[in-house]
């Protein structure tokens, strides 16, 4: 029964039903609190939800229970990379590779870390090892593309992006890479096409939304700013939104008080109105953003003659 | 232990009797084969014996046929002792009690059971009870005969023809030239060593008439039409799906000219690297074998298949000789949309002056199924209005205008995905038709 539940949770995770996977894993852990696999998978789920601290906590338990599991170190490396702890990320990758020298993900993640350091040769060496381990893989082709993109060799990056798309035209990372390349080349229409293609498939894809906002910014900086602000607001959880609003309230009140003390009463009242405006916007802005986004996602349109 | 030592121990016991010494003497007596004397020391020795020592001592006494003495050493409460107690009881002429004790022992621990003891105690071997509620896990698959397959496939004589398909003129022409003509003039094609039949895949967005076109093709070929559904082939028992598939093809070969139509072909011919178990890969292999027709002649059998996801079909199916012809069934154009709307409104109470041209213009990208849904929505609006007004309100332009605000085209998502495949994974020009369609009609 427990094994079945774990398999279900794992399938949910791979299908992108992260919340369901988290629920199943929490139920499982209530019955069997010392299951390293459950803690590890839960850490993976939380990582997908960008709940880094919670993921780190679960991963620490998993590693404590099973310190010889290379996957846990790769997860640790991903968390560290997202928290900009690049050195620790590199150490975690090395740890994983010590346990499993042919671990593809660990090599590719290591290349990611090297790219952050701008250590291009080391990054390429890692991707080369991965390419030997799994030739013809869409992920490896995409990593080569990312590597050349980071180096500024857009033509070669495009070649690899096309390669990865020819292996799997629906691959999320490959489409985002192609979008970034097209944006760099100034082909905004194509870039937008790839970004929206990913958003249609996976509305939770932060990278695709970021690319989409970058494209909007390139077209119009004010409108782009609006997109970016709303995308950021929409990505916040309920708790995060409350924290933002409370912090905003404090900042606005403090500013209004200061201006009032210095007898800039007009500015002070303007700030108060701005605060009210922000609160109202936080109610109407997000639905407006989603409505607009839905319209933007209707990418394919027919000629009026058809 | 030699005799002198044993005698020494016995003397020492006489002088200073102790429990420990009594135990040592008991085991020394067993070792020297003088079990008959054990009874003298047993009472005192018993105080210090643990479970295993008592068992060892009792076994020695049982071997020496001192069954009663052995029984006194043992405890009926201890599971490890129970079997020996039972043996002792049996030897002491209490078989019924012995049998009961043995049965209780093996019930508590089935590993204690042995055939020899079963025979000794006259106990019958238990047969595992099968729960009648459980279904048997395995089933013997017998070779199916041709007659039984008629139950599985829907044999259709009353197929439609191209006049029933609105629009799609280009694709009808292509099908007519490449598929129907070989059926209608077989001798001409045979003269040029051209095969009649083969495999054709119709692909396109959902609801655009692939199934209808397949039926019409069969009707135009004047051939029998077998509509094979996934449930006709897939079976929960290992090996049976392959057997069913083979039988379906056998049936088709015996009733040429005929058309076998597989809807949603990706369910049977999906990429093997994506299949999670070997049994679905076996079905794919069997399907390939049947299409090749090495051992049987597939002449006169046209295998038509339709799919919304041609990229999910295993590449082995698309090589020449199998499904070597692929036709793209696009969404209907303006003229076709108007005709479809007019077709679906027939028989419903509607105004005669409904502007179908204008509705068709607004419904760009709508599939046949979307258009049917649009008519249904307009009809619902009219029904609601009739209920509110208390008299019959016929379907009007306004109802369509309201309905089109709610309705959505379902083909754009498919075309967006197909565009990526056509641009980046267009091996051998497989999706050229999609590309040219997008180029011609896309904005």
Image (cartoon, coloured by chain):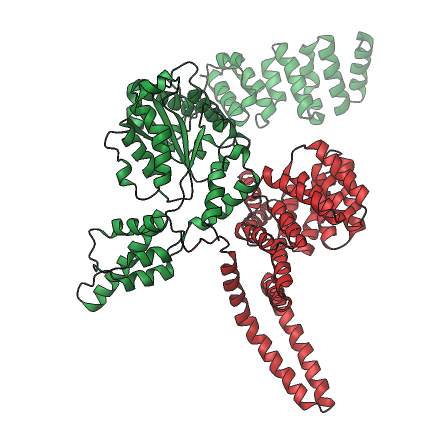
Chain colours: A red, B green
Spot occupied by residue A3 in the image (x, y as percentages of width and height): 56, 38
Viewer-closest of B262 and B139: B262
In the rendered structure, the answer to whether residue A188 lies left or right of residue B28 reads: left
Q: Residue furthest left?
A: B391
Q: Quadrant of the N terminus of chain B?
A: top right
Spot occupied by residue B135 in the image (x, y as percentages of width and height): 39, 28
How many labels sit on residues?
0
Spot occupied by residue A182 in the image (x, y as percentages of width and height): 64, 51
Q: Is residue B331 visible?
A: yes
Q: Residue furthest bottom?
A: A263
Spot occupied by residue A38 in the image (x, y as percentages of width and height): 62, 44
Viewer-closest of A78 and A7: A78
- Using the rendered view, name the quadrant where residue A155 is placed: top right
Viewer-closest of B151 and B357: B357
> Considering only vertical position in the picture, is A5 above or below B52?
below
- Using the rendered view, name the quadrant where residue B30 is placed: top right
Q: Is residue A95 visible?
A: no
> Considering only vertical position in the picture, is B122 above or below A116?
above
In the rendered structure, the answer to whether residue B166 lies left or right of residue B94 reads: left
Q: Which residue shows up at 64% across the image and 87% down it?
A: A269
């Amino acid at each position: 029964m427990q094994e079945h539940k774990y398999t279900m949770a794992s399938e949910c995770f791979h299908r992108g039903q992260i919340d369901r996977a988290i629920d199943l894993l929490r139920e499982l852990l209530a019955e069997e609190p010392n299951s390293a696999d459950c803690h590890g998978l839960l850490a993976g789920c939380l990582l997908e939800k960008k709940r880094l601290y919670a993921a780190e906590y679960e991963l620490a338990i998993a590693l404590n229970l099973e310190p010889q599991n290379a996957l846990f170190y790769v997860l640790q490396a991903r968390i560290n990379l997202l928290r900009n702890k690049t050195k620790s990320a590199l150490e975690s990758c090395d740890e994983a590779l010590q346990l499993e020298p042919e671990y593809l993900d660990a090599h590719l993640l290591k290349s990611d870390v090297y790219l952050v350091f701008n250590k291009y040769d080391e990054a390429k060496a890692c991707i080369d090892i991965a390419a030997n381990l799994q030739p013809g893989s869409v992920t490896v082709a995409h990593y080569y593309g990312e590597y050349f993109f980071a180096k500024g060799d857009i033509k070669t990056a495009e070649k690899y992006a096309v390669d990865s798309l020819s292996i799997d035209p629906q691959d999320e990372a490959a489409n985002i890479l192609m979008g970034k390349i097209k944006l760099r080349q100034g082909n905004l229409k194509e870039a937008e096409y790839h970004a929206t293609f990913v958003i249609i498939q996976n509305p939770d894809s932060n990278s695709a939304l970021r690319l989409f906002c970058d494209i909007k910014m390139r077209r119009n900086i004010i409108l782009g700013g609006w997109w970016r602000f709303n995308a950021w607001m929409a990505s916040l959880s309920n708790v995060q939104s409350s924290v933002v609003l409370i912090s905003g309230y404090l900042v606005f009140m403090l500013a209004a008080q200061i201006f009032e003390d210095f007898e800039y009463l007009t500015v002070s009242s303007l700030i108060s109105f701005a605060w009210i405006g922000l609160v109202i916007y936080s109610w109407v802005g997000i639905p407006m953003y989603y409505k607009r986004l839905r319209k933007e996602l209707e990418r394919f349109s027919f000629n009026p003659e058809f | 232990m030699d005799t002198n030592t044993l005698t020494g121990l016995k003397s020492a016991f006489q002088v200073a009797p102790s429990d420990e010494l009594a135990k040592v003497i008991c085991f020394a007596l067993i070792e020297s084969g003088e079990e008959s004397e054990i009874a003298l020391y047993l009472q005192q020795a018993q105080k210090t014996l643990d479970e295993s020592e008592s068992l060892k001592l009792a076994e020695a006494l049982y071997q020496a046929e001192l069954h009663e003495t052995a029984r006194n050493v043992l405890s009926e409460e201890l599971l490890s002792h129970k079997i020996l107690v039972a043996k002792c009881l049996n030897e002491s002429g209490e078989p019924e009690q012995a049998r009961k004790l043995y049965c209780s022992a093996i019930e508590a621990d089935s590993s204690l059971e042995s055939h020899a003891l079963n025979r000794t105690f006259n106990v019958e071997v238990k047969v595992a009870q099968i729960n009648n509620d459980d279904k048997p896990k395995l089933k013997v698959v017998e070779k199916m005969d041709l007659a039984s397959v008629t139950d599985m496939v829907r044999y259709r004589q009353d197929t439609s023809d191209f006049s029933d398909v609105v629009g799609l003129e280009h694709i009808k022409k292509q099908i007519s030239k490449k598929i129907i003509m070989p059926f209608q003039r077989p001798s001409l094609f045979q003269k040029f060593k051209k095969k009649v039949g083969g495999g054709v895949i119709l692909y396109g967005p959902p609801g655009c008439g692939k199934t209808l076109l397949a039926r019409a093709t069969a009707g135009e070929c004047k051939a029998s039409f077998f509509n094979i559904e996934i449930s006709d082939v897939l079976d929960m028992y290992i090996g049976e799906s392959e057997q069913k598939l083979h039988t379906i093809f056998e049936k088709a070969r015996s009733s040429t000219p005929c058309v076998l139509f597989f809807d949603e072909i990706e369910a049977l011919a999906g990429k093997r690297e994506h299949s999670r178990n070997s049994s679905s890969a076996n079905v794919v292999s069997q399907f390939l074998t049947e299409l090749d027709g090495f051992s049987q002649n597939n002449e006169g059998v046209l295998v038509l298949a339709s799919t919304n996801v041609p990229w999910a079909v295993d590449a082995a199916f698309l090589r020449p000789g199998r499904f070597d012809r692929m036709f793209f069934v696009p969404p209907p154009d303006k003229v076709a949309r108007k005709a479809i709307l007019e077709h679906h409104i027939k028989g419903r109470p509607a105004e005669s002056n409904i502007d179908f041209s204008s509705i068709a213009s607004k419904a760009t990208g709508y599939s046949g199924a979307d258009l049917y849904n649009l008519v249904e929505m307009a009809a619902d609006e009219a029904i609601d209005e009739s209920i509110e007004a208390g008299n019959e309100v016929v379907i009007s332009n306004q109802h369509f205008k309201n309905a089109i605000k709610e309705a959505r085209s379902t083909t754009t998502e498919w075309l967006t995905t197909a565009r990526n495949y056509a641009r980046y994974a267009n091996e051998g020009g497989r999706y050229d038709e999609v590309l040219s369609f997008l180029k011609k009609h896309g904005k």
